[in-house]
Amino acid sequence: MTAASAGSSSRRSDSSDNAESMSPLGGRYTTPTVTCASEPLIDTTSASRFSVVVDKLPSTVALNVSQMYSATPVPLLLLGQDINMFEARLPQGGLMKKILEALKDLVVNANWDLSSEGMSLQAMDQSHVSLVSVLLQSSGFEEYRCDTNCIMGIQLATMIKVMKCCNNDDSLKMEYKDDPGDTVTFTFESPNQERTSEFTVKLMTIDSEHLALTDDGYDAMITMPSAEFQRICRDLSAFGDAVTIAVIKNSVTFNASGDLGGGTITLLETNSEKEEEKVQIEMDNPVALTFAFKYLHYFCRGAPLSPLVKLTLRNDSPLVVQYDIANIGNIRYFLAPKVTDEDEAA
């Protein structure tokens, strides 16, 4: 072999050993031909350059590093940039539609608090007379992921419009990422997976106060059918704009009066075989409080979420109306008692 040919061969060898190629992410990197590594270690200190450290194995298997990365660009997420995200899936989107319907008369804009334990919402009505609290536990979702605690501010009317595009038996998937962090994606999928819809909603920055809701006990607690409570509010509101709820021993009385007359409905404790027909009354102290029908009508919108409603009363404290949402959480309404002329005089 001549010196010229040897030099040429040497140059070809150097060229094949250290060929410059374009990185899938842009820029150039050196592509050595190496024997197959048992565990290649990828140096990710530069987004535009790869270096591979390999163990020497028999030369029967050889591969070119460029072939490992030329087919598919490597996403930046794999290069050490973590993206926190929230993802939750309900098998039936109809449940979320019912929850939003139960909120729409009281809440305009609200913050959903997202954590590993679940989703929660707390908001007051514009007059600051009532408050609503929603808790959806992570264990009640078919799939749930929340990498870090975050807040998702959204206009409720927009969320309701999007959910109207979801059939009751469609699955619902919600996704939110903190990069860029200004949108949430809703995906609806039909049971046979033949139809998929995806909607993106812009998020908002909402100033709101978060109140600590403590359980200070009760003077009386009534568990009754949701439909019965709804009917009582509808029937008695024809005679006045407020109702007095009084609990004595084993009975609860709802009374309303006005210029046209008045009406009284009394329920006794019952032990029906059907759970949804039971009326249970627990009383530590007699209690009688008056509340505005306007807000009770709003609270009745939660009836489709549960066959039973729980009323918790305590003297000089707000009424708590609670609907338990099976296997996932609850929705609670708080309403301040109405101040009567007798109370003001006292």
Image (cartoon, rainbow, N blue to C red):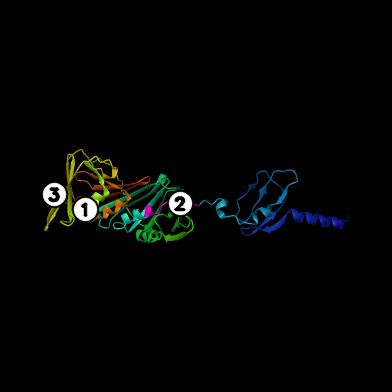
Left or right, 1 with reference to 323: right
- Pinpoint residue 88: horizontal percent, then vertical percent: 44, 51
Quadrant hosting residue 252: top left
Q: Which residue is mark 3?
A: 343
Reading the chain from its start, which is encountered first: label 3 or label 1? 1
Most foreground residue, 79 or 170 = 170
Crowdedness of circle 1 by 10 Å Cα count: few (<14), some, many (20+)? some
In front of the other: label 3 or label 1? 1
In the image, what residue type sits under mark 2?
Answer: Glu
35, above or below 22, in the image: above
Give the mark, 2 or 3, whose residue is nearer the N terminus.
2
Q: Position of residue 346 (x, y in %)?
A: 11, 48
Which residue is rendered at x = 38% and y = 60% of the image? 164
Q: Is residue 344 left or right of residue 152?
A: left
Q: Is residue 295 above or below residue 328?
A: below
- For marks 3 and 1, give the CA distance: 24 Å
Q: CA distance from mark 2 to mark 1?
A: 39 Å
Residue underneath mark 2:
87
Q: In the image, what residue type sits under mark 3?
A: Asp
Q: Is residue 214 visible?
A: no
Pointer 1 residue:
233
Whichever of labels 2 and 1 marks the residue nearer the N terminus, that label is 2
- The residue carrying pointer 3 sits among few (fewer than 14), some (14 to 19) or many (20 or more) residues within 10 Å by Cα, namely few
Residue 214 covered by magenta stretch: no
- C-alpha distance separating marks 2 and 3: 50 Å
What residue is shown at x 22% (from left), y 56% (from top)?
A: 294
Q: Which dot, 2 or 1, sits closer to the camera?
A: 1
Query: In what element is the residue under mark 3?
Result: helix
The residue stretch that appears in magenta: 83-96
